[in-house]
Amino acid sequence: MEKVYRYNEIVSGIATQIKDGILRAGDKLPSVRMLCKEYAVGMNTAKRVFLELEAQSLVEVKPQSGFFVSNHRVERLPLPAVSKPSLIANHHEPSELSSQVYSSIGRNDLTLFSIGVPSGSLLPLAKLKKEIIYATRALKEGGTEYEPLQGNVKLRRMVAVRSLAWGGNLHEDDLITTAGGMNALAFCLMALGKRGDTVAIESPCYPGILQLVISLGLKVLELPTHPVTGIEIDALRKVVSKIDICLLIPNFNTPLGSCMPDEHKKEVVQLLAANDIPLIEDDIYGDLYFGTQRPRCCKSFDTAGNVLWCSAVSKTLAPGYRVGWVAPGKYKEKLLKLKLVHAIASTSVIHEAVGNFLKTGRYDRHLHQLRRTLQHNYQHFIDAVTEYFPEGTKTTRPQGGLAIWIEFNKEVDTVKLYELAMKQKISIAPGPMFTLQNQYQNCMRLCIGLPWSDELKFKLKQLGNLVKMM
């Protein structure tokens, strides 16, 4: 686990007091000097405490006056209830709505609340271009040769090093590179499943996963999911004899943004291992945490090689680069055979460039800024939803990731809302995209990866007005 530094302990203590209502909106906090004296820490540590609390939108600074508990209204909107999908597996074809919504990718004339990636303006594009040039120069034959089947050594080594932060303790030989996160999930599903097998997933779930599972001839069993803590373990326990594979996004899944507590992750890993059911863990959002520490992964509790841990830089650095990886545990040889058949090798230059970006520390500096921006964006979105959306609106409260899940009153049909919004050049992701069942008609997902602006705020106001008219 990542070392818990003194400033993290102080931040956690003050944050808890704010969330528990001991410190209330508008309350003045101790000065930097007083914090130094009270906790016996240096000036730099005290300043970092306030920077972190400010990044979490828990405090705000007033010039010449000091730090105060923020007046943001994140707690005013109620949470959606735990989802209640039918616990019967099915292989229904996903709605064409997903293809329609995602066909908007790349359209500059739309406000794309529907696409769950960070905007290019939030990414280090100039630095990445330089890395591509350096990689071309560094690689033999300019990167035109096939690389080893397992993938770029530098990239695998740096991913392994970074796994120490969440308790993974991986070695470069534990990893296989892939063409993005979805490619990693596809290899895992193909290696583990056969036509007719049942895959347990969260509900609501990322549409791409639903489409992938069905395309491989597998069935989907949707699990009840809490908007804060993830899947309901009791529900998983009840159906464990009926499933062949479990695929979860434990850290800041989309669209809910839920994050499973460590004890839940450990229990899920043990439950599935005891029943010889492999767990595919999609950790693509794990680096986008809003707090002081990266959450652990299910893989950190895996002692049997039963967890296939997948991730990528698609949601953090470069969606179009298609750089991903998997630590497949005891299924490594199966995945290597699949990669040989379906890909032979990864894209040498791109994977070398990303590996070097991780090695030089540029990735961590970028992530620090991106997380701060997403945290602030989240607060802006919640403030706008509170102000402009109708009474009775419910929202999730993710502690990381790129998504907010909105639930309206039952009379609101978000498919119709999507059609109305598109006429005003606004694209949303309607709730029915995230399920194979007849549910979530009154829900939608909003992506918070767009740079905040007055124009974005106005678009949310327009969206709110459309909802009020329904």
Image: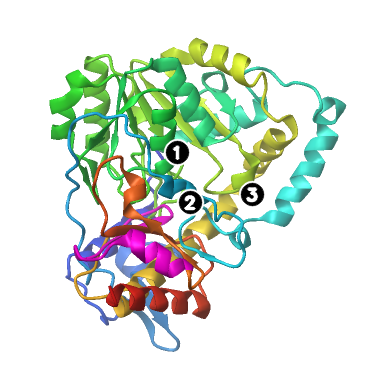
Cα gap from disc 3 to disc 2, whole angstroms: 36 Å
For this view, does 16 lie left or right of residue 287? left
230 versus 408 height, above or below: above
Q: What residue type is disc 1 on? A: Ala
Residue that mark 1 sits on: 165
- Residue 67 lies, in percent from the top left, at 37, 78
Residue that mark 2 sits on: 100
Q: Residue at image x 58%, y 28%? A: 178
Q: Nearer the viewer, residue 397 or 158?
A: 397
**Residue 362, numbered circle:** 3
| Magenta span includes 420 | yes
Helix or strand or loop: what does disc 2 sit on? helix
160 versus 456 height, above or below: above
Q: Residue at image x 48%, y 46%? A: 99
Q: Which of marks 3 and 1 is nearer the N terminus?
A: 1
Helix or strand or loop: what does disc 3 sit on? helix
| Circles 1 and 2: CB atoms closer than 8 Å | no
For marks 3 and 2, give the one nearer the viewer: 2
**Residue 229, numbered circle:** none
